[in-house]
Amino acid sequence: MSLHNGVLDYTDLSVHHIEPLTEAWDRRLDDDNLITLNSFYHEQAEAGSITKDLLYELAASPPALNLEKLGHSNTDSPPLKITNSVNEME
């Protein structure tokens, strides 16, 4: 899932192995070595632009969606649209 312009997007997601398979085949299914990323962030992680430390931190404790930061209280109806299609986002 990614958040873009107030839209939760469930498209173009894949699993990233924080420790590459070529270096840690035995950790390929360890939950703490896996994180779901969209293609943009997956490419950044593969290139090393996102540190392994940050990826481990995110995998251990994904950030909570804070509606108050988006300008709504938790009692308001969410200002978010959930989409499974890129076309729905536009």
Image (cartoon, rainbow, N blue to C red):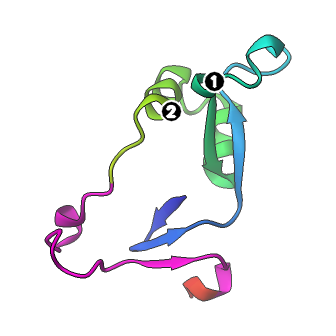
Q: Nearer the viewer, residue 4 or 57?
A: 57
Residue drawn at the location 55% of the way across and 32% of the way down: 50
Query: Magenta stretch containing residue 17, yes or no?
Result: no
The magenta span reads 65-87
Lower position in the chain sequence, tag 1 or tag 2: 1
Does residue 23 appear in the picture of this structure? no
SS of the residue under disc 2 = helix
Q: Looking at the rendered structure, which numbered label has been put on residue 59? A: 2
**Residue count near mark 2 (Cα–Cα under 10 Å), binned few <14, some 14–19, many ≥20:** some
* Circle 1 residue: 33
Q: Is residue 75 above or below residue 24?
A: below
Going by the image, does 41 lie left or right of 78? Answer: right
Going by the image, does 28 lie left or right of 73? Answer: right
Q: Amino acid at mark 2?
A: Ala
- Our reading of the magenta stretch's main secondary structure is loop
Residue drawn at the location 51% of the way across and 32% of the way down: 59
SS of the residue under disc 1 = helix
How far is mark 1 from mark 2, CA to CA?
8 Å
Q: Quadrant of the C terminus?
A: bottom right
Query: Magenta stretch containing residue 85, yes or no?
Result: yes
Does residue 25 appear in the picture of this structure? yes
**Residue count near mark 1 (Cα–Cα under 10 Å), binned few <14, some 14–19, many ≥20:** many
